[in-house]
Amino acid sequence: MTEQKPKLEHLLWAAGGLLTGAWWVKNQHDEAKKSRAEKDDPDGVEEVCNAFGPILDQWEPEHFETEDEYVEDLFNYLVDDTDESEEEDETEEDEETDFEIETRPNTPEGQPDILIDDRLAIEVKVNLSKAERDRLIGQTAGYSREWVTWIVLIDTPESRVGALERLLAAKGLDHILVFAFS
């Protein structure tokens, strides 16, 4: 019986080693998915995402004719909401948070619809078709190497939203968040 105990310990050590190895591989894979912004300034990226996630969730887009009009409306909403929260922050803590928000900046990775503080790219699509979806995957895959990337879908049927999310996951791009507005 004492001979079995060392064998059992050996199995436990092997299992522990496998779990540690699996954790390390997953961690390396997650690290490889991170954008340049996340690697260079994880705290700054977290600050931008925490500031703009709730703002984006509260946005209620009006009805417009073109995607450009939706982008402009979202841009103005983000700028206005950030300005209001900065004024509140200044009175409460006398601490100012400045985020640079740009529309369609020319970058080596392309032209995201909105770029926030060189950390967060937002791409807006209206009534996403299959052809636009395929182009969107390529765009956002490129953006996600440089910045945290979010997709904003407007007037897109739930089935297409789900199909996009599944396609992103299948291509290893499940770190790209999708916000859908009707």
Image (cartoon, rainbow, N blue to C red):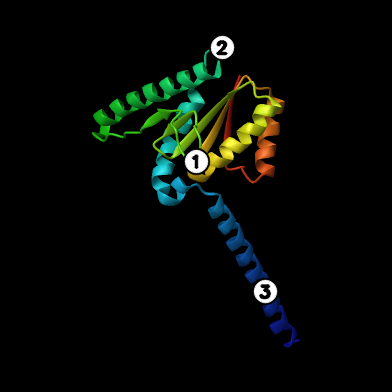
Across and down, in percent, residue 67 comes to 55, 19
**Which of disc 1 and disc 2 is earlier in sequence?**
2
Q: Nearer the viewer, residue 168 or 109?
A: 109
Task: Say which quarter of the image contains residue 163.
Answer: top right
Q: Name the spot of residue 154 as percent of width and height, x first.
A: 59, 21
Q: Distance between the residues labelled 2 and 3?
A: 61 Å
Q: Which mark is residue 148?
A: 1
Q: Against 36, is 122 above or below?
A: above
Q: Mark 2 points at which residue?
A: 65
- Tell me how far mark 2 sits from mark 1, CA to CA: 28 Å
Secondary element under disc 3, as helix, strand or loop, is helix
Lateral position of residue 37 relative to residue 12, left or right? left
Q: What element carries label 2?
A: loop
* Rendered-image quadrant of the C terminus: top right
Q: Find residue 14 and name its label.
A: 3
**In the depicted structure, whether residue 11 falls above or below residue 142:** below
Residue 85, quarter of the rendered image: top left
Packing grade of label 2 (10 A; few <14, some 14-19, many >=20) is few
Horizontally, residue 142 falls left or right of residue 40, namely right
Q: Front-most of 36 and 110?
A: 110
Q: Which amino acid does label 1 sit on?
A: Val
Question: Mark 2 or 3, which is nearer the eye?
Answer: 2
